Amino acid sequence: MRQCMLCLKGSIIRGKRRLLRGHYNPVSQARKYPNLQKTSFAGMKLTACTKCIRTIAKAGR
């Protein structure tokens, strides 16, 4: 499963909504994944979401 190794953020299932004659029609379900990037942190290579990467970069200043 695609998951952030720091905050354990994973995929979620959300319903798509389509506007149909002034009313939203929940049509189907779609799986959404976080924006995961490969990075190195404390000598380890890991897969982290971009929010965690920004937080690490901000703390490293």
Image (cartoon, grey):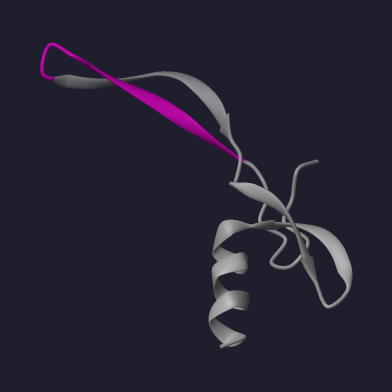
Q: Residue at x 54, y 69 (%)?
A: 54
**Quadrant in the picture for residue 13:** top right
Left or right: residue 22 compared with residue 3? left
Above/below status of 3 relative to 26: below
Q: Main secondary structure of the magenta part?
A: strand
From this viewpoint, which residue is outermost toward the front? Answer: 61
Residue interval drawn in magenta: 12-22
Residue found 86% across the figure and 61% down from its top:
45
Where in the figure is residue 41, as x and y percent of width and height? Answer: 78, 72
In this picture, residue 60 sits left or right of residue 3: left
In this orientation, which residue lies closer to the viewer: 45 or 6?
45
Residue 35 x, y percent position in the rendering: 59, 46
| Image position of 45 (left or right of 61) | right
Residue extending farthest to the right is 44
Residue lying at 45% horizontally and 29% vertically, measured from the top left: 15
User: On screen, 11 above or below 8?
Assistant: above
Eyeballing the image, is 5 above or below 23? below
Q: Is residue 14 magenta?
A: yes
Residue 15 located within the stretch drawn in magenta: yes
User: With 40 as the anchor, is 56 left or right in this view?
Assistant: left
Q: How many numbered circles does the render carry?
A: 0
* Residue 9 placement (x, y as % from top left): 66, 56
Residue farthest toward the left in the current orientation of the protein: 22
Image quadrant in which the N terminus is located: top right
Q: Residue at x 56, y 75 (%)?
A: 55
Residue 40, compared with residue 60, is above or below; it is above
Question: Split into 4 quadrants, where in the image is the C terminus?
Answer: bottom right
The part of the image, by quadrant, that contains residue 40 is: bottom right
